[in-house]
Image (spheres, helix red, strand yellow):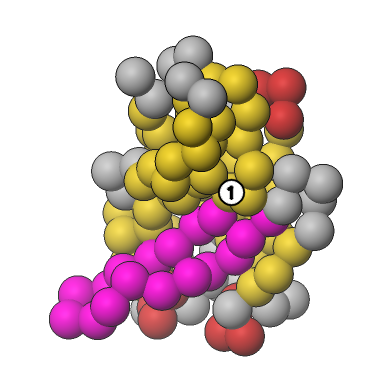
Amino acid sequence: QVQLVESGGGLVQAGGSLRLSCAASGSISGINAMAWYRQAPGTERGLVAMITRGGGTNYADSVKGRFTISRDNAKNTVYLQMNILKPEDTAVYYCNADIWYSQRLTNYWGKGTLVTVSS
């Protein structure tokens, strides 16, 4: 069984920083793209940032220059460094990954971690 477990969320003042982590566990053969999504109350879940296995990245316009996604392939872990946080960044942040498990490539979601940015 594969699991994605996020950590690092919490309450921070506007202008502050947080670092989210997401670790994949289980009998994993490999991981392709990994990503962070977020969902604020009353809105749809949307992509924040994505990183390929080779390190190519893509960001939502709203976070470019403030957020950095990275990964450690040896640890099956993806990170999201969030700087200059704004109240509008408040959301539940979800980890997402395309994982090779039992010779199949399957998309997995974590359960989410709450980030609250106070003004």
**107 or 60: nearer the eye?**
107
**Residue 83 lies in the magenta stretch:** no
Q: Position of residue 100 (x, y in %)?
A: 55, 31
The residue segment tinted magenta is 35-51
Question: Is the magenta region chiefly helix, strand or loop?
Answer: strand
Q: Position of residue 77 (x, y in %)?
A: 60, 33
Left or right: where does residue 36 sit relative to residue 32?
left
The three-letter code of the residue at mark 1 reads: Met
Q: Let me know if residue 36 is in the magenta part.
A: yes
> Which residue corresponds to the image point at 63% horizontal and 28% vertical from the top-left?
30
Residue at 58% across, 49% down: 34
Q: Report the side of 64 relative to 77 (left or right).
A: right
Is residue 66 visible to us here? no
Q: Quadrant of residue 76?
A: top right
Q: What residue is pinned by disc 1?
A: 34
Who is closer to the viewer here, 8 or 97?
97
Q: Residue furthest front?
A: 103
Q: Quadrant of the C terminus?
A: bottom left
Residue most extreme to the top: 27
Q: Is residue 43 visible?
A: yes
As displayed, is residue 90 above or below residue 30?
below
Residue 80 vertical position relative to residue 116 in the rendered view, above or below = above
Eyeballing the image, is 63 above or below 70?
Answer: below
Callout 1 crowding tier (Cα within 10 Å): few <14, some 14–19, many ≥20: many
Identified at 60% across, 21% down, the residue is 29
